[in-house]
Image (cartoon, rainbow, N blue to C red):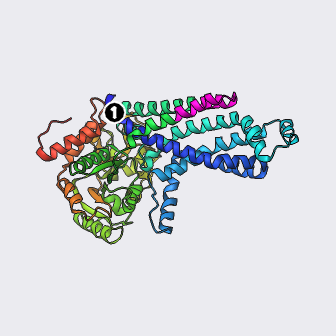
Amino acid sequence: MSEALGQLPPLIASHVLLAAAALALALIVGLPLGLTSARRPRLASVAVGFASLVQTIPGLALLALFYPLLLALSALVGGGVPALGFLPALLALSLYALLPILRNVVAGLNGIDPAVLQAADAVGMTPWQRLRLVEAPLAAPVAMAGIRTAAVWTIGAATLATTVGYPSLGNPIFAGLQIERWDLVLSGCIAAALLALATDALLGLIERGIGRRQSALTLAGVGLLALGLLLAMAPLVRAPLRTVTVGAKNFSEQYILARLIGTRLEKAGYRVSYREGLGSAVAFRALQSGDVDVYVEYSGTLWTGAMGRHDTPPRQAMLDGIAKWMAAGPKTGLIGALGFENAYALAARPGSGLASIADLAARAPQLTLGADLEFLDRPEWRAIRDAYRLHFKATRAYSPTFMYRALASGQADVISAFSSDGRIAADHLTVLTDPKGAVPHYDAILLASPAYAHDARFVGALKPLIGAIRVEDMRAANLSVDRDSAKATPEAAAAWLDQKIRSRSAPLP
């Protein structure tokens, strides 16, 4: 647990920065819009209706939607608009925070007794004086209740920013869920909850000060809130050095390889940050745009996804084709293949009587297929399905870790396994052969962004990894993170793998 807590300070700092910025932006938009809407019922209907509509969109989907929008905007203005990281998270969270602020400002102003307003007019107050001296103080408690709700929502939803590559308290939560490290999950959840409770308490103090018209109480709340923000964000104050961003998808192998790459780069003198939990398409586009500088992709994923190819050439021909395509089109760089393959495969429980996908075709209508979150929408699945005419009774999507649990518990009969996953051997699963060759090769390949594709120092720091990772070592490292007991952290597994590459005699972590 102490290790999990040790990684929290910089994540708390970036989490607080994002939540504070999103809430500030929502206030900048919501307060004047609420004030105007309170005097114009039609505008109020449209504004509150729009904010309510935003609330119906799942938070994760709203974050994802900003990615293509910002990419399109960047292309329109000639580049420079980041599609991952802080900006999409800021915009999505600000929209989410808008509804409680807007609705409560309108409700607070409309709830003032008309006789009070008539009295203010009767004594000759100007509209500005009436707003400042009468309406704002009376509506403030209701408006503050909305701001408190928005603050708590924003701090909680900011954990989702991890999925678009922004470091937040979602990092330990998502990583912990993938590798079943509950200390990581708890540390992220507890930290986010404490932040939300502390913020709500301080905003409540400000609310009481405003309600009782006690300026000292209000100023004390504002001062404590400002002090808390400064203390929480202190870890962000560092020397302005160029940071290399290592990307990773959302499963154990990617977390391990990201740390392995990051460690190598740090030893070469680079400052390193991580963007983890990315989807396949998002990861490669992030590489193209420079939001990610280096990550590990799989040749079949790039071949069938970004390149849109449907053939399955020999391994080396595929790698050569990918290198030429990357150099000619996206201007990214293929540093090389790491030496192992992590192919999609269909796996069944031992004793299922299945040996090949051809065997599976006849029994599929009585079986349930469990797949990772991407597989059922990927061209590889369509290729397998069409080649063997597979029609399952049902299909269910899981995170990779829970997919294996579903197979063990009988909720799934067949799963889309990964060939370098140590759990295949540990659980004695049967990997179904592919006699028709429907699945392409999936060599793990190291990719670099346009900024680093031809940087000799950068490439030189990572070259020792090329061809150096054996599949049995990768399986052992994966299993050390995924196993049920005595789990290793991705950092420990990466350190072991690094030592294994150097000596090939290190004991398993």
Residue 445 in sight in this render: yes
Residue 436 in sight in this render: no
- Decide whether residue 115 is among the magenta residues: no
Secondary structure at numbered mark 1: helix
Q: Quadrant of the N terminus?
A: top left
Against 221, residue 386 (above or below) is below
Q: Position of residue 20 (x, y in %)?
A: 52, 42
Residue at x-position 20% and y-position 55%: 461
**Magenta residues?**
203-225
Which residue carries the number 1 mark? 6
Q: Position of residue 34 (x, y in %)?
A: 70, 46
Determine crowd level at label 1: few under 14, some 14-19, many 20+ residues with C-alpha closer than 10 A: few
Residue at x-position 51% and y-position 47%: 60
Residue type at mark 1: give it: Gly
Q: Position of residue 258 (x, y in %)?
A: 29, 48
Q: Position of residue 505 (x, y in %)?
A: 11, 40
Residue at x-position 61% and y-position 28%: 217
Against 395, residue 300 (above or below) is below
> Nearest the camera: 9 or 281?
9
> Nearest the camera: 414 or 216?
216
